Image: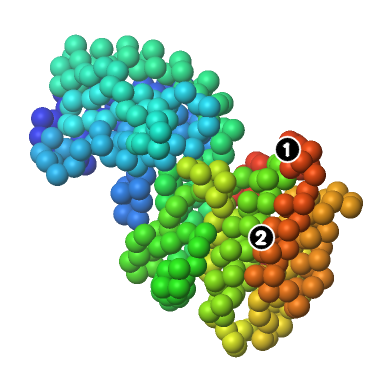
Amino acid sequence: MKDPPTSGTEEAFHGDWDANIRSIIEVCVPGGISQRNSHIATREVRPDYTYCIGEACPFRGEEESPETFTEDPRRELANNLVWMFGVTPYILGYYAKGTCVTLVALTAPQSGGNVGIHDLVRVDLSSWRGRIQNIVHLLNLSTFLDPLSQLMDRSGPEFLRLERDTCTIEFTSFVIVKTFRDSAKAKRLCALYDLIVANNVPNTDHVSYSSGNIVHLKPRGSAFRPRTVPELYERVRCVLEALVVAHRILLYHRNIRPENVIRKIDNPSKWFLVGWEDAASGPRTLAQPHFASETHCPDVFHDDHGPEVDIWGVGLLTEECCRFAGRPLSKFGQSLQKQAKELTATAALQQLHDIYNNLPALWITECNTFADVTGPRWLRSEDNR
């Protein structure tokens, strides 16, 4: 093993970081996938190095040249991570400044603070002694990666790349990166979000960065389906609150499906509406023949549709989690679909409050009410449109 450089750009050190970290991890934990992030669109939002086992990423690293004084790889490692791993006690990683490498454990934030970062051991790869010590440390740490990945799998994938007809979607720890094939579509999406922000539409994501055909969206949520009556109530409430304001300015989402209603990671009682690419601003609207008839209001396939397409979608959203004959919330979902043209979002929201507040206490506290559809299988399937 040759001696690494003592100076140079970050790229000059890639070969030595790979030889002393990546190669060792890959040998100790076969079956995982290494990825070095060199994509311009995700360089600031995805770690420089990740090692994923299945859908989990139990080991990651941030790297900098020793000649870079404006960036702190330790801070980047913690700041570029939103904890979404449930009961997982910690994950592992490293930060490197040239040949100086520090192995760390990352833990869940306490009381709403930042992710905890705990230095475990520091080695200097410039010497043979340091490189041998590094091998020993990585051999020890690698035994934890498989068990950690099994715990992390329960939370769904942290990093994911999906190819859609109009764009590529990159899921990172805390932001969604959409790279459109047509920059006009990116510009249109940004204009829609400008309208959302200008009118204070609640419970939506927002554009955090855009350039050309690239759009970054925050926050990154959790793909979760309600399993209790309170969870279903909160999800539907948050969507209707967004629609009350959106419909006031004649803005129609048109694609309300379970896939587009995401739970906040840092506040499980809050949900937000995403996927505004197909939204339309009235009063003139055009038919959307590419949508799927089983998941969209019949009116959306005709010109000049309006708020009824969203009300119908909320009905489907409610019913797909509550299919029990006679249940008030199930009947509520059915009524939204049947009376979509007569009901406003404001009226539907009031009905939801009234029904929920009059539910028997046993139903409200009941757990495991709904089918177990919490798995984020939709992330891996084709877009159901």
Kindly identify the amino acid type of the residue bearing the numbered disc 2: Arg
Q: Is residue 223 above or below residue 217?
A: above
**CB atoms of marks 1 and 2 within 8 Å:** no
Quarter of the image for residue 278 reads: bottom right
- Residue appearing at x 35%, y 17% in the figure: 138
Which element carries disc 2, helix, strand or loop? Answer: loop
Instruction: Report x, y in % for residue 128.
Output: 18, 14
Q: Residue furthest right?
A: 325
Quadrant (top left, top right, bottom left, bottom right) of the C terminus? bottom right
> Which residue is labeled 1 in the image?
365
Which circle marks residue 257 in the picture? 2
Left or right: 313, with 105 as reference point? right
- Residue appearing at x 36%, y 59% in the figure: 208
Left or right: 100, with 281 as reference point? left
Which element carries disc 1, helix, strand or loop? Answer: helix
Kindly identify the amino acid type of the residue bearing the numbered disc 1: Thr
Quarter of the image for residue 275 reads: bottom right
Q: Mark 2, residues whose alpha carbon is within 10 Å: few (<14), some, or many (≥20)?
A: many
How much space separates mark 1 and mark 2, taking CA atoms?
26 Å
Q: Is residue 170 above or below residue 81?
A: below
Instruction: Report x, y in % for residue 167.
Output: 49, 63
Which mark is first along the chain, 2 or 1?
Answer: 2
Q: Is residue 300 above or below residue 243?
A: below
Instruction: Report x, y in % for residue 159.
Output: 47, 43
**Residue 381: in sight, yes or no?**
no
